[in-house]
Image: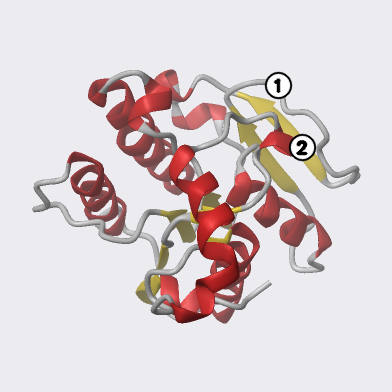
Amino acid sequence: GTGLVGRALLSLLLASDRYRKVHLLVRRVASNLPPSAKLKVQKVDFAQLPSSALPAADDVFIALGTTIKVAGSEHAFRQVDFDYVVNIARGALDVGAKRLAVVSAMGADPRSRVFYNRVKGEMEAAVAQLGYEIVVIAQPSLLLGDRATLGQPARRAEDMATRFLGPVSWIVPRGVRPISARSVAAAMFAEVLAATPGICRLKSGAMQGGG
């Protein structure tokens, strides 16, 4: 709930009549959270996450991720984008969750020669095999949004896309053009509400324009 997609998802979940409670798991103290009586914030160590630390839930939304530059190494990146994500998904399943939605990335492929894409692809394969009734995997292109407002460091590629591609984004193929975090969140939310059993991969082009 502290990143671009996570914060957008949080707003949708809190506004929805479907959910009586929204449990937000965070690695650090979050600021400027939307005020809501049904929001429960829990600070956790994702590296040491036992299932007993997770509250019972029906639906799980995971928007956890970093970059190799921010993480500091490939090992640290994999710990966040693979280990932590799979830990949460497995732990939530153990306490009763049935539907899972997770943010991955365009180009995710467990056989990719690109380390980033390979880790994302391996994460997708791992969560798909856990046994959820519904798995929604969002594969966005470069995300657009204001990270500074959330207290996050800017990401160079996203910043360049916002400044240089924004005015001419209409000529960039829909499937690869940068996408707003709100559109990704809206697409994930809608797909979980649709409750179609199985695994659904939301391609970036299909998510454009939502939210």
Mark 1 lies on a secondary structure that is: loop
Q: Is residue 63 visible?
A: yes
Contact, CB < 8 Å: mark 2 with mark 1? no
Question: Picture coordinates of residue 19 (x, y %)?
Answer: 75, 60
Q: Is residue 192 visible?
A: no
Going from N to C along the chain, the mark reached first, 2 or 1, is 1
Among the 4 quarters of the image, the one containing residue 200: bottom left
- The correct choice, above or below, for 2 with respect to 164 in the image is above
Q: Which mark is residue 40?
A: 2
Label 1, on which residue? 29
Closest to the observer: 176 or 63? 176
Say left or right for 93 vs 191: left
Closest to the observer: 207 or 12? 207
Callout 1 environment at 10 Å: few (<14), some (14 to 19), or many (20+)? few
Question: Picture coordinates of residue 47 (x, y %)?
Answer: 40, 21
Among the 4 quarters of the image, the one containing residue 107: bottom left
Identify the residue shown where x is 38% and y is 69%: 176
Say left or right for 135 vs 30: left
Q: Quadrant of the C terminus?
A: bottom right
Question: Disc 2 marks which amino acid?
Answer: Lys
- The correct choice, above or below, for 202 with respect to 39 in the image is below
Q: Quadrant of the N terminus?
A: top right
Question: Picture coordinates of residue 124 (x, y %)?
Answer: 28, 54
Q: Disc 2 and disc 1: Cα gap in Å?
A: 13 Å
